[in-house]
Image (tube, rainbow, N blue to C red):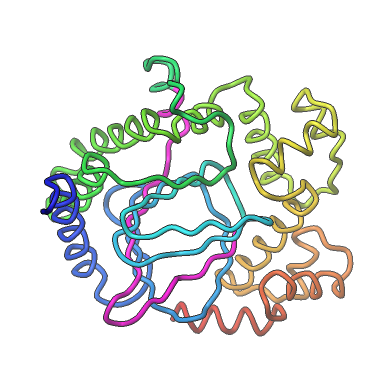
Amino acid sequence: MIHPVDDELRRINGELKRRILRHLPVPGKQATAVKGLTLSRRQEINKADNCFGTPSVAAIVQGGKCALIGDREYRYKEGQFCITGGDLPSAFYILHPSEEKPFLSVILDLDSQLISRLAMEMPPASEKQGGRGGGLSIGELDADLLQCFLRLVELLDKPEQIRIRAPMVIREIHYLLLAGPQGESLRQLNTLGTQSNMIAQAISWLKDNYKEPLHVDELARRANMSSSTFHRHFKEITGLSPLQFHKQLRLHEAQRLMVLENRKASSVSLLVGYESDTQFNREYKRLFGEPPYRDKLQRQTFLQ
Protein backbone atom coordinates (compact mmCIF):
# COMPACT_ATOMS: atom_id res chain seq x y z
CA MET A 1 0.00 0.00 0.00
CA ILE A 2 1.37 3.45 -0.99
CA HIS A 3 1.42 5.90 1.89
CA PRO A 4 -0.43 9.13 0.96
CA VAL A 5 2.51 11.29 2.12
CA ASP A 6 5.00 9.33 -0.02
CA ASP A 7 2.61 9.52 -2.97
CA GLU A 8 2.36 13.31 -2.59
CA LEU A 9 6.15 13.67 -2.39
CA ARG A 10 6.56 11.63 -5.57
CA ARG A 11 3.98 13.77 -7.36
CA ILE A 12 5.67 17.05 -6.36
CA ASN A 13 9.14 15.69 -7.15
CA GLY A 14 7.99 14.42 -10.55
CA GLU A 15 6.57 17.83 -11.46
CA LEU A 16 9.77 19.57 -10.34
CA LYS A 17 11.82 17.15 -12.44
CA ARG A 18 9.70 17.80 -15.51
CA ARG A 19 10.03 21.57 -15.15
CA ILE A 20 13.80 21.53 -14.54
CA LEU A 21 14.36 19.39 -17.64
CA ARG A 22 12.23 21.80 -19.68
CA HIS A 23 14.16 24.84 -18.46
CA LEU A 24 17.52 23.05 -18.76
CA PRO A 25 17.46 20.85 -21.89
CA VAL A 26 21.28 20.49 -21.72
CA PRO A 27 23.67 20.10 -18.76
CA GLY A 28 24.62 23.25 -16.86
CA LYS A 29 23.59 25.68 -14.13
CA GLN A 30 21.08 28.41 -14.81
CA ALA A 31 20.36 31.46 -12.70
CA THR A 32 16.67 32.30 -12.97
CA ALA A 33 14.42 35.35 -12.91
CA VAL A 34 13.73 34.57 -9.23
CA LYS A 35 16.57 36.26 -7.36
CA GLY A 36 18.84 33.70 -5.70
CA LEU A 37 17.21 30.67 -7.39
CA THR A 38 19.40 28.43 -9.59
CA LEU A 39 18.59 25.25 -11.51
CA SER A 40 21.27 22.60 -11.97
CA ARG A 41 21.60 19.64 -14.33
CA ARG A 42 24.80 17.57 -14.25
CA GLN A 43 25.70 14.29 -15.95
CA GLU A 44 29.52 14.18 -16.00
CA ILE A 45 30.89 10.77 -15.03
CA ASN A 46 33.90 10.51 -12.69
CA LYS A 47 34.49 14.27 -12.82
CA ALA A 48 35.34 15.93 -9.53
CA ASP A 49 34.96 19.68 -9.29
CA ASN A 50 35.94 22.35 -6.79
CA CYS A 51 33.85 25.31 -5.78
CA PHE A 52 33.53 27.91 -3.08
CA GLY A 53 30.04 27.51 -1.71
CA THR A 54 27.98 30.37 -0.36
CA PRO A 55 25.07 30.13 2.13
CA SER A 56 22.35 28.20 0.30
CA VAL A 57 19.95 25.27 0.38
CA ALA A 58 19.75 22.71 -2.42
CA ALA A 59 16.81 20.37 -2.96
CA ILE A 60 17.93 17.20 -4.73
CA VAL A 61 15.32 16.24 -7.31
CA GLN A 62 17.14 13.36 -9.04
CA GLY A 63 20.40 11.47 -8.51
CA GLY A 64 23.00 11.90 -5.79
CA LYS A 65 26.07 13.92 -4.93
CA CYS A 66 29.16 13.62 -2.74
CA ALA A 67 30.75 16.73 -1.23
CA LEU A 68 34.17 16.83 0.41
CA ILE A 69 34.77 19.65 2.88
CA GLY A 70 38.10 19.46 4.62
CA ASP A 71 38.39 15.92 5.98
CA ARG A 72 34.62 15.29 5.95
CA GLU A 73 32.54 13.53 3.30
CA TYR A 74 28.83 14.23 2.82
CA ARG A 75 26.54 12.16 0.57
CA TYR A 76 23.00 13.19 -0.28
CA LYS A 77 20.44 12.12 -2.83
CA GLU A 78 16.93 12.52 -4.25
CA GLY A 79 14.47 13.24 -1.46
CA GLN A 80 17.01 15.16 0.62
CA PHE A 81 18.20 18.74 0.90
CA CYS A 82 21.63 20.13 1.71
CA ILE A 83 22.23 23.37 3.62
CA THR A 84 25.52 25.18 3.18
CA GLY A 85 25.44 27.50 6.18
CA GLY A 86 28.54 29.56 5.38
CA ASP A 87 31.19 30.35 2.77
CA LEU A 88 32.92 26.98 2.36
CA PRO A 89 35.46 25.62 -0.13
CA SER A 90 34.56 22.10 -1.22
CA ALA A 91 35.14 19.43 -3.82
CA PHE A 92 32.21 17.42 -5.15
CA TYR A 93 31.25 14.83 -7.71
CA ILE A 94 27.95 13.48 -8.99
CA LEU A 95 27.06 9.88 -8.09
CA HIS A 96 26.20 7.59 -11.04
CA PRO A 97 24.85 10.19 -13.51
CA SER A 98 23.82 9.45 -17.09
CA GLU A 99 22.21 11.19 -20.05
CA GLU A 100 19.01 9.29 -19.33
CA LYS A 101 19.06 10.15 -15.62
CA PRO A 102 21.06 13.33 -14.96
CA PHE A 103 21.58 14.85 -11.52
CA LEU A 104 18.94 17.55 -10.95
CA SER A 105 18.69 20.08 -8.15
CA VAL A 106 17.12 23.42 -7.23
CA ILE A 107 19.35 25.81 -5.27
CA LEU A 108 18.25 28.85 -3.27
CA ASP A 109 20.61 31.40 -1.72
CA LEU A 110 20.02 31.89 1.99
CA ASP A 111 19.45 35.38 3.38
CA SER A 112 21.27 35.83 6.72
CA GLN A 113 19.24 38.94 7.61
CA LEU A 114 15.97 37.11 6.97
CA ILE A 115 17.18 34.18 9.10
CA SER A 116 18.03 36.59 11.95
CA ARG A 117 14.62 38.32 11.77
CA LEU A 118 12.69 35.06 11.67
CA ALA A 119 14.74 33.55 14.50
CA MET A 120 13.76 36.49 16.73
CA GLU A 121 10.06 35.90 16.00
CA MET A 122 10.17 32.12 16.54
CA PRO A 123 10.10 30.21 19.86
CA PRO A 124 13.37 28.78 21.24
CA ALA A 125 14.80 25.67 19.61
CA SER A 126 13.27 22.34 20.61
CA GLU A 127 15.25 19.41 21.99
CA LYS A 128 14.93 17.71 18.59
CA GLN A 129 17.06 20.40 16.99
CA GLY A 130 20.81 19.99 17.12
CA GLY A 131 23.14 22.61 18.53
CA ARG A 132 26.17 24.02 16.80
CA GLY A 133 27.16 21.85 13.85
CA GLY A 134 29.34 22.05 10.80
CA GLY A 135 28.80 24.47 7.98
CA LEU A 136 27.04 21.81 5.89
CA SER A 137 24.03 19.74 6.96
CA ILE A 138 21.65 17.32 5.26
CA GLY A 139 17.96 16.75 5.89
CA GLU A 140 14.94 14.92 4.49
CA LEU A 141 12.59 16.82 2.19
CA ASP A 142 8.97 16.82 3.29
CA ALA A 143 5.97 17.78 1.16
CA ASP A 144 5.76 21.32 2.59
CA LEU A 145 9.37 22.22 1.77
CA LEU A 146 9.41 20.50 -1.62
CA GLN A 147 6.14 22.20 -2.57
CA CYS A 148 7.76 25.59 -1.85
CA PHE A 149 10.57 24.82 -4.29
CA LEU A 150 8.01 23.76 -6.88
CA ARG A 151 6.07 27.01 -6.40
CA LEU A 152 9.24 29.03 -7.04
CA VAL A 153 10.02 27.08 -10.22
CA GLU A 154 6.39 27.44 -11.37
CA LEU A 155 6.78 31.22 -11.08
CA LEU A 156 9.35 31.11 -13.90
CA ASP A 157 6.36 30.67 -16.23
CA LYS A 158 4.58 33.64 -14.63
CA PRO A 159 7.27 36.36 -14.65
CA GLU A 160 4.75 39.12 -13.93
CA GLN A 161 4.02 37.49 -10.53
CA ILE A 162 7.62 36.97 -9.38
CA ARG A 163 8.14 40.35 -7.70
CA ILE A 164 5.18 39.89 -5.35
CA ARG A 165 4.95 36.14 -4.80
CA ALA A 166 8.58 34.95 -4.79
CA PRO A 167 9.60 36.81 -1.58
CA MET A 168 6.69 35.20 0.28
CA VAL A 169 7.69 31.68 -0.82
CA ILE A 170 11.37 32.37 -0.05
CA ARG A 171 10.40 33.54 3.44
CA GLU A 172 8.41 30.34 3.95
CA ILE A 173 11.42 28.20 2.93
CA HIS A 174 13.61 30.02 5.44
CA TYR A 175 10.97 29.50 8.13
CA LEU A 176 10.65 25.76 7.41
CA LEU A 177 14.43 25.32 7.59
CA LEU A 178 14.61 27.17 10.91
CA ALA A 179 11.73 25.10 12.30
CA GLY A 180 13.35 21.83 11.22
CA PRO A 181 16.13 19.69 12.73
CA GLN A 182 18.86 21.88 11.17
CA GLY A 183 17.30 25.10 12.45
CA GLU A 184 19.47 25.63 15.51
CA SER A 185 22.70 25.44 13.49
CA LEU A 186 21.30 28.12 11.16
CA ARG A 187 20.32 30.26 14.15
CA GLN A 188 23.76 29.99 15.69
CA LEU A 189 25.53 30.96 12.46
CA ASN A 190 23.30 33.99 11.98
CA THR A 191 22.82 35.28 15.56
CA LEU A 192 25.19 38.00 16.70
CA GLY A 193 27.37 37.10 19.66
CA THR A 194 27.29 33.30 19.30
CA GLN A 195 30.57 31.46 18.75
CA SER A 196 29.35 30.17 15.39
CA ASN A 197 28.49 33.69 14.28
CA MET A 198 31.91 34.96 15.41
CA ILE A 199 33.51 32.29 13.21
CA ALA A 200 31.21 33.33 10.34
CA GLN A 201 32.37 36.92 10.78
CA ALA A 202 36.00 35.77 10.77
CA ILE A 203 35.34 33.91 7.52
CA SER A 204 33.80 37.05 6.03
CA TRP A 205 36.87 39.07 7.09
CA LEU A 206 39.17 36.48 5.50
CA LYS A 207 37.22 36.67 2.24
CA ASP A 208 37.70 40.44 2.13
CA ASN A 209 41.38 40.27 3.11
CA TYR A 210 42.66 37.03 1.56
CA LYS A 211 45.66 38.81 -0.01
CA GLU A 212 47.05 39.69 3.41
CA PRO A 213 49.31 37.35 5.42
CA LEU A 214 47.35 35.18 7.86
CA HIS A 215 47.67 35.93 11.58
CA VAL A 216 45.49 33.44 13.47
CA ASP A 217 46.11 35.15 16.82
CA GLU A 218 44.69 38.39 15.42
CA LEU A 219 41.61 36.60 14.03
CA ALA A 220 41.07 34.91 17.39
CA ARG A 221 41.29 38.28 19.14
CA ARG A 222 38.66 39.70 16.77
CA ALA A 223 36.41 36.77 17.70
CA ASN A 224 37.05 37.22 21.45
CA MET A 225 38.48 33.70 21.71
CA SER A 226 41.78 32.14 22.63
CA SER A 227 43.78 30.88 19.65
CA SER A 228 43.12 27.23 20.55
CA THR A 229 39.35 27.78 20.99
CA PHE A 230 39.16 29.75 17.76
CA HIS A 231 41.05 27.03 15.86
CA ARG A 232 38.74 24.32 17.23
CA HIS A 233 35.49 26.13 16.43
CA PHE A 234 36.77 27.21 13.01
CA LYS A 235 37.45 23.60 12.04
CA GLU A 236 34.09 22.44 13.45
CA ILE A 237 32.30 24.76 11.02
CA THR A 238 34.54 24.69 7.94
CA GLY A 239 36.24 21.31 8.17
CA LEU A 240 39.54 23.16 7.63
CA SER A 241 42.14 24.89 9.75
CA PRO A 242 42.34 28.69 9.32
CA LEU A 243 45.58 28.23 7.34
CA GLN A 244 44.01 25.68 4.98
CA PHE A 245 40.93 27.87 4.53
CA HIS A 246 43.05 30.95 3.76
CA LYS A 247 45.08 29.02 1.19
CA GLN A 248 41.96 27.70 -0.57
CA LEU A 249 40.43 31.18 -0.63
CA ARG A 250 43.47 32.44 -2.54
CA LEU A 251 43.49 29.52 -4.96
CA HIS A 252 39.76 29.73 -5.74
CA GLU A 253 40.11 33.45 -6.43
CA ALA A 254 43.11 32.76 -8.68
CA GLN A 255 41.05 30.23 -10.61
CA ARG A 256 38.18 32.72 -10.99
CA LEU A 257 40.54 35.41 -12.31
CA MET A 258 42.07 33.05 -14.87
CA VAL A 259 38.88 31.39 -16.09
CA LEU A 260 36.40 34.29 -16.04
CA GLU A 261 38.73 37.27 -16.55
CA ASN A 262 41.30 35.43 -18.71
CA ARG A 263 44.24 36.52 -16.55
CA LYS A 264 47.62 34.80 -16.88
CA ALA A 265 48.75 32.40 -14.17
CA SER A 266 51.99 34.34 -13.73
CA SER A 267 50.06 37.49 -12.81
CA VAL A 268 47.29 36.02 -10.65
CA SER A 269 49.70 34.42 -8.21
CA LEU A 270 50.85 37.88 -7.14
CA LEU A 271 47.31 39.29 -7.23
CA VAL A 272 46.06 36.75 -4.69
CA GLY A 273 49.02 37.14 -2.34
CA TYR A 274 51.60 34.53 -3.37
CA GLU A 275 55.23 35.63 -3.43
CA SER A 276 56.49 32.46 -5.14
CA ASP A 277 55.19 31.22 -8.52
CA THR A 278 56.61 27.78 -7.75
CA GLN A 279 54.65 27.51 -4.52
CA PHE A 280 51.51 28.81 -6.24
CA ASN A 281 51.75 26.26 -9.08
CA ARG A 282 52.40 23.40 -6.64
CA GLU A 283 49.48 24.25 -4.35
CA TYR A 284 47.15 24.98 -7.28
CA LYS A 285 47.78 21.55 -8.81
CA ARG A 286 47.35 19.88 -5.41
CA LEU A 287 43.88 21.44 -5.00
CA PHE A 288 42.50 21.36 -8.55
CA GLY A 289 44.35 18.36 -10.00
CA GLU A 290 45.94 20.26 -12.91
CA PRO A 291 48.57 23.01 -13.29
CA PRO A 292 47.04 26.52 -13.60
CA TYR A 293 47.38 26.93 -17.38
CA ARG A 294 45.93 23.50 -18.22
CA ASP A 295 43.10 23.88 -15.70
CA LYS A 296 42.25 27.30 -17.16
CA LEU A 297 42.02 25.90 -20.72
CA GLN A 298 39.85 22.97 -19.66
CA ARG A 299 37.41 25.12 -17.71
CA GLN A 300 37.15 27.80 -20.40
CA THR A 301 36.43 25.07 -22.97
CA PHE A 302 33.70 23.66 -20.71
CA LEU A 303 32.08 27.11 -20.39
CA GLN A 304 31.96 27.72 -24.16
Magenta stretch contains residue 108? yes
- Could you say which is closer to the camera, residue 170 or residue 234? 234
**Does residue 234 appear left or right of residue 185 in this picture?**
right
Image quadrant in which you'd find residue 278: bottom right
Tell me if 86 is positioned left or right of 232 in this view.
left
Q: Is residue 20 above or below residue 43?
A: above
Res 134 quadrant in image: top right
Q: Position of residue 158 (x, y in %)?
A: 12, 51
264 lies above or below 104: below
Residue 255 rendering spot, x and y as whole percentages: 64, 68
Name the residue: 76% across, 71% down: 267
Tell me which residue sits at (22%, 69%) in the image.
Answer: 21
Q: Horizontal and vertical percent for residue 232?
A: 76, 37
Please say whether residue 157 is one of the residues in the magenta stretch.
no
Q: Quadrant of the C terminus?
A: bottom left
Q: Between residues 78 and 32, which one lies in front from this camera angle?
A: 78
Q: Residue at x 62, y 79 (%)?
A: 296
Give 270 or 244, whichever is nearer the viewer. 244
x then y, percent, for residue 73: 58, 58
Q: Residue furthest front?
A: 1
* 50 shown above or below 201: below
How many labels sit on residues? 0
Q: Is residue 30 left or right of residue 65?
A: left
Region rendered in magenta: 90-116
Q: Which residue is at a point 58% across and 73% down the rendered structure image? A: 259
